[in-house]
Image (tube, coloured by chain):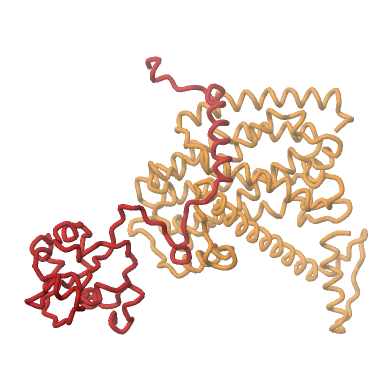
Amino acid sequence: MTDSQKVPGPLEGLPGIIKGMWTVFIEGFKPKVTKQVPEEKLEYTARTTGRVFLNVETCIGCTLCEQICPNGTIKMVDMSYQKKEEFEKKYPNKRHIYPSVDVSICTHCNLCEEICPTGAITLEQEVEEVHFERKSTRYTPLELGKRENEISQEAKQ
Amino acid sequence: MNLFFFLMSILYGILKFLHINFVPFVYDGYPIGLWIAYAIVAVVEVVLVFALSMIAVVIIVYVFRKYMADVQNRIGPNRVGIWGTLQLIADVFKLIQKQDLIPSNADSFGFKIAPYIVFTPVAIGFILIPFGNVSILNLMVTNFNYTVLFLIGVMIVAPLGEIIGGLSSNNKFSLYGALRSAAQDMGYEVPMIISLVSVIILAGSYSADGIVYAQRHIPFIVPEFIGFIVFFLAMIAKQSVPPFDLPESGSELVSGFSTEYSGMRYGIFYMANFGFMALASFVIAVLYLGGWEGPIFPGTIWLVIKGAVFIMIFLLTWVSLGRVRVDQFLNMGWKYLLPLSIINLLISSGLALYLGGVF
């Protein structure tokens, strides 16, 4: 056995043992880092990306988001929607197609937000998505504009 | 007053209330004609102490989980009951509901009897602890002249259950755990008994209350500090908790001797582990810190305080220290603890010879 492999005896290791126990003892008085979800709200960092949000007024139906989406999360659907006056002139949607998103397979990759020419699609910090049926995970364009708690529970069920 | 006579008088009152007349034969102050009443009272006492030990186990498990959570900056159990106090009860109900699983090629008899062999010594050990001042209020279920010897003899049985359980599980990890348990017993039991013998020499008594009475002026931790350290390390090794958890070795062997155990059989191992922690802290308090001796408060409170201090030290070593290797543990036991305990024996023999009147 070489010197580097030499194991310290009990008395040589005693200061280290006492130091370690003291460190652990002090650690017991430090504040807790656990958050009691859902009673306490989590704090999200700036880079946290959650569900896709859509501003229906500024969407021009260019289908770029459907083309860039890597796993077919975004599908364009037909929807007749009357925009407001000022948006109708600046962002006309002549084909009346808008993106719909299946949140169960969305990877939050952020590509749709980057490619969108008008900034209609954004990824907000909305991560608490509860669904009771698989078919309810595909959001219509109008539902994409709302927060989770604004979407009615009937629509989810 | 005696706990025995207290319960006897209650039983006497109940019998009088029911108009059951009896004529006790009194011999040497003891009504010997009432052997049925004696038997009932003895059973009640044993059940009472067993229930108290189980309550102690519940409290220790809760404190352990909360303290470990504190050290790791977590919150710990907080959903069942107020602040999670009923978590162990919920766990026990969960374990009872589980399937009773025995490996196909296991030795069925040994596999089934091993948890009880581990658990029974803990339950027996509690009836030998003097919980209060013997001369004022005899809170001791059995009191005879060789209590401490019987206590140690009972406690040494417990690792046998671990070995039986490990050998009969038909699992290589269990086998390794059983062999490590045997090796560990070899390492610490001889120093433990020698340091206990030095306590007996210094006290001049084999009984627990005699040892406590001998510490009425000065607790034995002062003249026998070396023996106290040896006995304390042996008690940690006896519980097989970190840093001496060689029979279980969670990171090397899957769970050691209890790998194949599940459901309530594992639950019995778990309760025995924590019950022995309570028993060991009480034994150390009785042998080295003067048991129920102390000012102002009643003796029972002093014993509980001293025991709680040792339980917290056990928990602190549990959560902070890493596991030693088998060869390191055996080196420690045979090369360091055994000579230290013999030195301690010589010191205490000398003290008993020349200062015998003090103790």
User: What x and y, as percent, mark residue B129?
Assistant: 73, 50
Judging depth in this view, the residue of B277 and A140 nearest the camera is A140
**Residue B234 appears left or right of B323:** right
Q: Quadrant of residue B227?
A: top right
User: What x and y, as percent, mark residue B2?
Assistant: 85, 59
User: What x and y, as percent, mark residue B153?
Assistant: 64, 44
Chain A drawing hue: red
Q: Give the quadrant of the C terminus of chain B.
A: top right
- Name above or below for residue B185 compared with residue B343: below
Q: Give the quadrant of the N terminus of chain B.
A: bottom right
Judging depth in this view, the residue of A90 and B250 nearest the camera is A90
Chain B drawing hue: orange
Residue at the (39%, 43%) spot, across then down: B251
User: What x and y, as percent, mark residue A100?
Assistant: 17, 73
Q: Quadrant of residue A2?
A: top left
- Name above or below for residue B84 compared with residue A152: above
Judging depth in this view, the residue of B271 and A29 nearest the camera is A29
Residue at the (68%, 48%) spot, across then down: B308
- Name above or below for residue B19 compared with residue A65: below
**Residue B321 appears left or right of A4:** right
Residue at the (83%, 38%) spot, across then down: B214
Residue at the (62%, 42%) spot, across then down: B313
